[in-house]
Amino acid sequence: MSDMLEYKGYSGTVEYSIADNVLFGKVLGIKGLISYEGDSVQSLRQDFEGAVDEYLEMCTDNNEEPQKPYRGSFNVRVSPELHRSLAIYSFSRGQTLNSTVEEAIKRHVQAQ
């Protein structure tokens, strides 16, 4: 797993360009592009935090609600057969479909 930067609830990638000899990244989980760069880990982190702060300030100045990086919901498309099997499995265990999917995802992520 690659390294991530975290600041005020936002996550950002850490990448390296050999051609430019620079670290760079982008904020994940929001529409639009918030990018940053630096020539050291410290300067990359500072530029990342500055970019997040600028984004939040711009939202305030424009009287807009900042995008939340992750709302806690997303759509997943599966085959009708898997959907049916999952619904039956959930019902037989007295669970909602949502709680069964959440449990399965937690198990998968924790196994990594």
Image (tube, rainbow, N blue to C red):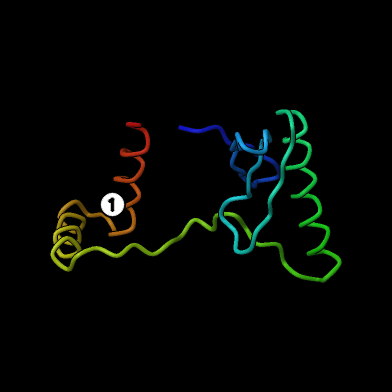
Position of 42 with respect to 5 (left or right) is right
Q: State how many labels appear.
A: 1
- Amino acid type indicated by mark 1: Thr
- Who's the residue at 63% across and 44% down the image? 25
Position of 46 with respect to 89 (left or right) is right
Q: Quadrant of residue 4?
A: top right
Q: Nearer the viewer, residue 42 or 91?
A: 42
Q: Nearer the viewer, residue 95 or 73?
A: 73
- Who's the residue at 86% across and 66% down the image? 61
Residue 66 higher or lower than 45, as above or below:
below
Callout 1: few (<14), some (14-19), or many (20+) C-alpha neighbours within 10 Å? Answer: some
Give the labeled residue for mark 1.
Answer: 100
Residue that lies at the very extreme toward the front in this rendered image: 19
- Who's the residue at 77% across and 41% down the image? 47
Residue that lies at the very extreme toward the bottom in this rendered image: 63
Q: Where residue 40 sits: x, y (%)?
A: 73, 28
Q: Nearer the viewer, residue 18 or 14?
A: 18
- Quarter of the image where the N terminus is located: top left
Circle 1 SS class: helix
Residue 54 higher or lower than 59, as above or below:
above
Q: Where residue 7 sits: x, y (%)?
A: 69, 41
Position of 91 with respect to 53 (left or right) is left
Residue that lies at the very extreme toward the right in this rendered image: 61
Position of 58 with respect to 36 (left or right) is right
Residue 11 higher or lower than 70, as above or below:
above
- Quarter of the image where the C terminus is located: top left
Q: Where residue 37 sits: x, y (%)?
A: 72, 41
Q: Quadrant of residue 59?
A: bottom right
Q: Where residue 41 sits: x, y (%)?
A: 70, 28
